[in-house]
Image (cartoon, grey):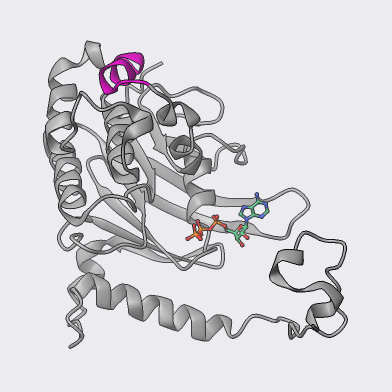
């Protein structure tokens, strides 16, 4: 069923804990307006993927805590919600001896020929490629075209541009921005790569240890922020500052020292590293 209401996302006091673990996210409330481009910012393990997967209906959130275009994403399969994350990237079909045209057809590309051709142009795709014989970045570009060819209303992106060269990524981000300008759609994007993102986000969400520390229109944060002298963009300086203070607040990880004393790998698979006999030769 396609969402009929504007593509806004509302999260109300959302807590999710992984079964048998103490980790997850807690007490998250935020609201993402239609046509916004929201960046999810946070250190590794802050909770970005967990939140995105909950928004995509891939994990069960407590009833009433998430509304995407007016409905609960877990209860109702949302035709217009596209989630592109790691499991989608790892789909083995894109490593087989299959052509680009066939792949794009398999995801409904023929129903949207203009969009398909536009994406082929923006992502600089050669339709003659065979997928077992392309580079990682070329494969990723085809995957992006596959994932985006159907006109989504809510796009949830969990960093999937790492293999793109700088120009391809800039073109891709420009295309996403245009989408929100010409269509009624909304993007939430979790990333650590801030290159070419100056001026891109309309909203920022700063996550730390499973919570949202702050969120709101990007200008609310960037406007106050003068930036530094390191050559980073204002966004880069803002995010570096956030992550530094998060790390300071969290403090060092509570780890035991990992000496070799008492470690014996003689029965494990580490023989090739010369670690039999506790690493002593
Ligand atoms: N399947 C799982 N089972 C138990 N705990 C998990 C699971 N997946 C993630 N976690 C924990 O939940 C927390 C949030 O993880 P999440 O993957 O959402 O972080 P992230 O912000 O996306 O990190 P990254 O930037 O590294 O991708 C972390 O403490 C992580 O260890």
- Depicted 164 relative to depicted 184: above or below: below
Whether residue 69 is visible, yes or no, is no
Q: Residue at x 34, y 77 (%)?
A: 240
Q: Quadrant of ligand 1?
A: bottom right
Give the x, y percent position of residue 8.
33, 39
Q: Quadrant of residue 185?
A: top left
Name the image quarter holding the C terminus.
bottom right
Q: Is residue 235 on the magenta stretch?
A: no
Residue reaching furthest to the front: 281
Q: Residue at x 74, y 73 (%)?
A: 274
Main secondary structure type of the part rendered in magenta:
helix
Q: Is residue 100 left or right of residue 200?
A: right
Give the x, y percent position of residue 263.
84, 77
Q: Is residue 106 on the magenta stretch?
A: yes
Q: Is residue 69 left or right of residue 262?
A: left
Q: Is residue 67 left or right of residue 225?
A: right
Name the image quarter holding the N terminus.
top left
- Depicted 219 relative to depicted 105: above or below: below
Whether residue 126 is visible, yes or no, is yes
Magenta-highlighted residues: 98-108
Give the x, y percent position of residue 124.
15, 37
Exactly how many numbered labels are in the figure? 0
- Depicted 198 relative to depicted 109: above or below: below
- Depicted 123 relative to depicted 40: above or below: above
Give the x, y percent position of residue 225.
21, 79
Compare residues 42 and 161 and report the one nearer the observer.
161
């Amino acid at each position: 069923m396609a969402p009929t209401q504007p593509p806004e996302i509302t999260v109300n006091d959302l807590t999710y804990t992984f079964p048998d673990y103490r980790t997850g996210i807690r007490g998250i409330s935020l609201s993402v307006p239609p046509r916004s481009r929201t960046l999810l910012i946070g250190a590794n393990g802050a909770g970005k993927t967990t939140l995105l997967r909950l928004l995509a209906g891939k994990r069960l959130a407590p009833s009433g805590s998430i509304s995407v275009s007016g409905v609960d994403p877990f209860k109702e399969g949302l035709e217009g919600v596209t989630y592109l994350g790691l499991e989608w990237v790892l789909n083995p079909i894109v490593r087989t001896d299959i052509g680009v045209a066939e792949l794009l057809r398999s995801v409904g590309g023929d129903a949207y020929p203009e969009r398909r051709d536009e994406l082929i142009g923006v992502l600089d795709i050669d339709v003659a490629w065979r997928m077992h014989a392309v580079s990682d970045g070329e494969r990723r570009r085809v995957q992006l075209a596959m994932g985006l060819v159907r006109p989504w209303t809510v796009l949830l992106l969990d960093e999937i541009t790492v293999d793109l060269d700088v120009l391809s990524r800039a073109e891709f981000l420009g295309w996403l921005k245009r989408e929100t300008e010409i269509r009624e759609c909304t993007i939430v994007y979790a990333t650590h790569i801030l290159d070419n993102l100056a001026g891109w986000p309309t909203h920022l969400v700063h996550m730390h240890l499973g919570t949202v520390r702050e969120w709101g229109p990007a200008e609310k944060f960037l406007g106050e922020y003068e930036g530094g002298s390191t050559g980073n963009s204002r966004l880069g300086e803002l995010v570096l500052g956030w992550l530094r203070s998060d790390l300071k607040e969290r403090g060092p990880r509570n780890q035991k020292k990992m000496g070799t004393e008492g470690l014996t790998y003689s029965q494990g698979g580490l023989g090739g590293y010369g670690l039999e006999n506790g690493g002593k030769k």
